Image (cartoon, grey):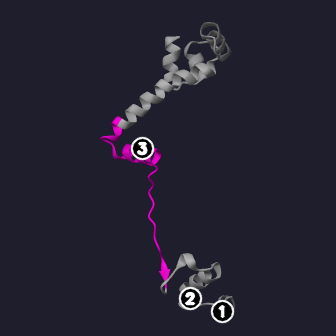
Amino acid sequence: MQEVEKLCGLQCTAQEIADWFHVSVDTLDRRMREERHVGFAEFFATYRTSGKIALRRTMFRLAESNAAMCIFLAKNHLGMVDKIETDITTKGQSLNDLTDAELVGIIQGGRSGGTATPAQSA
């Protein structure tokens, strides 16, 4: 059972653990019920926590010397994002305030060098 606990801590699947012991998944589940009075899924949920804690500890240690891990943890635990906000204006007016038709006119006008109407662009 100690070996099964360790394998659960490493996030091994029921199939992998069964294969390790050369038994079927059903046999593994049956042994859990006989010896621990819980099915494999419940046993796994309990013992996988130690693996998660160990992984988290390693990640935080690694972040001290690894910029990529530091960035990953900042994004996932602190909610930081790679985001640059820009405010583009045209003739003093923010593009956010323009209608779709006005934006299309600006885009078409930029391609032709002037303001184009639908009849002119056809």
Mark 1–mark 2 Cα distance, whole angstroms, equals: 10 Å
Q: Is residue 36 magenta?
A: no
- Closer to the chain start, of discs 1 and 2, is 2
Relative to 99, residue 22 above or below? above
Q: Which mark is residue 112?
A: 2
Give the quarter of the figure containing the C terminus. bottom right
- Closer to the chain start, of discs 3 and 1, is 3
* Disc 1 and disc 2 in contact, CB within 8 angstroms: yes
Please name the residue shown 62% across and 18% down the image: 40
Q: Can see residue 102?
A: yes
* Disc 3 and disc 1 in contact, CB within 8 angstroms: no
Please name the residue shown 44% across and 57% down the image: 82
Secondary element at tag 3 = helix
Towards the viewer: 71 or 22? 71
Q: Which mark is residue 120?
A: 1
Sort mark 1 into few (<14), some (14-19) or many (20+) by Cα contacts within 10 Å: few
Q: Which residues are magenta?
A: 61-90
- Looking at the rendered image, the disc whose residue lies closer to the viewer, 3 or 1, is 3
Relative to 56, residue 4 above or below? above
Q: Position of residue 6 (x, y in %)?
A: 48, 18
